[in-house]
Image (cartoon, rainbow, N blue to C red):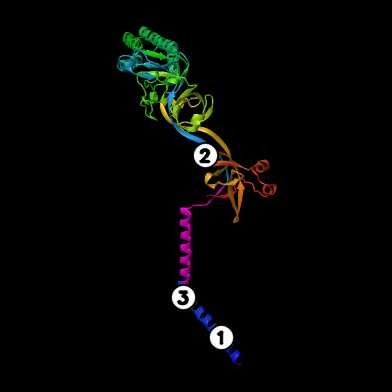
Amino acid sequence: MVKRTTNVESREKNIKRKSKLINFLKKHRKIILLLLLACILIYIIYMVVKLIQKPTDTVYVEMGQVREEEIAVGYIIREEEVIKGENYKNGIEQIKTEGEKVAKGEAIFRYYSNNEKSLVEKIKELDGKIDEAMEATEKLPTSDTKALEDQIDSKIYNLYGESDLKVIQNSKDEIISSMSKKSKIAGEQSPAGSYLKKLIDQRSEYENELSSGEEYIEATKSGIVSYRVDGYEDILTIDDFGKYTKEFLEELNLKTGQIIPMSSEEGKIVDNYECYIVCVLDSDYAKDAEVGDSVTIKLPSGKEVKASIEYKATEDKEYILTLKIDEGVEELTSYRKISFSIIWWSSSGLRVPNTAISTEEKNGNEIAYVTRTRIGYEDKILVKVLKTNEKYSLVTNYTSDELTELGYTPAEIRNMPNIAIYDEILIN
């Protein structure tokens, strides 16, 4: 009887405690809810900070490219010929623009005549007076003058863009002749003809004076035109690559990436088919390079072009390479010394960070492997490293024969997983 009473009292006490707890929770539910929210917020902030400090400890296997790239400084060597006339002090007018291709015999620029500006102004002034005089004359025979006017307009139009000196001179002579014929017709039928003839004769004198002082410069060979003349055209030549020692190149005191200024006195014809870049390197790749090897170079613009090693010399522990390119030649006419990259090799395949690769020893061999994670489970995957640089490696799976040679048993080989694209792997 006593025991039953004790159980009843115990149940009543439990009910009272639960009731008090419920009342307490109800009374302080807002405070409790705020505390829970605060804890959740603190946890979220902690995880975000942790993620920022260490964004992830896994990466995905991807298809990518791995290359070995070396930064170098190179000197541009090209076949080029400077062209200069007698009237170089007068300044030049470009007929062919910078970088434009020309054939042998084409006019590329001309020197201004003596007092050209003054003569041009006088001719312009006379043209205005001639037009006024023509309007003041009596009406001319339409059939005769219309034909002459059409001839003059046609020949002036055809002169635009013409670079052949003979064509230019013949056209000028024909224009002057047509204007003279027109003035004679006006002179025969108008009292103002003698005045008009005087103006035409004066214009002809100015034209002759202007023409006699002109000097057109023609291309001596085919190539591209450049007005960037720096005085190294006869120093940095292609006749002897052996002369380009480290000391020789340093004594040139050229600035890397400096653009050659435009000349107002001379121009040059540059071989647009090929040019050479001489550089001094100390890498193992340069040490192992041989004449005839092919590499890829990245020009200052970012363009990648093929190159071949034309010449190699050794100085102490450094190597002087002369690279030949036949692409992007026009891009380099503005420079004499550039910073560029040599890409010694480049391959594509399954790419993983080097920090994801570990090694284990098997029968005296160091075997590379990565650790794959899937739904909380981790697998060790053996990988064969094909190519590697400072950051990444290209990997593939071993064949069964290769694993057998390395000392793995058939049972081990059967149970080995393979690496595949999009696998999630751990970083060390």
Q: Position of residue 341 (x, y in %)?
A: 47, 32
Whether residue 335 can be seen here = no
Q: What is the span of residues highlighted in magenta in the rendered image?
A: 32-60
> Where does label 2 land, which residue?
389
Q: Amino acid at mark 2?
A: Asn
285 relative position to 364: left or right: left
Q: Could you tell me if the residues under marks 3 and 2 are in contact, i.e. CB atoms within 8 Å?
A: no
Separation of marks 3 and 2 at Cα, in angstroms: 63 Å
Q: Is residue 145 above or below residue 423?
A: above
Q: Nearer the viewer, residue 407 or 154?
A: 407
> Where does label 3 land, which residue?
28
125 relative position to 76: left or right: left
Q: Nearer the viewer, residue 315 or 3?
A: 315
Q: Position of residue 213 (x, y in %)?
A: 34, 11
3 or 2: tag closer to the N-terminus: 3
Q: Amino acid at mark 1?
A: Ser
Q: Is residue 143 above or below residue 274?
A: above
Q: Could you tell me if the residues under marks 1 and 2 are in contact, i.e. CB atoms within 8 Å?
A: no
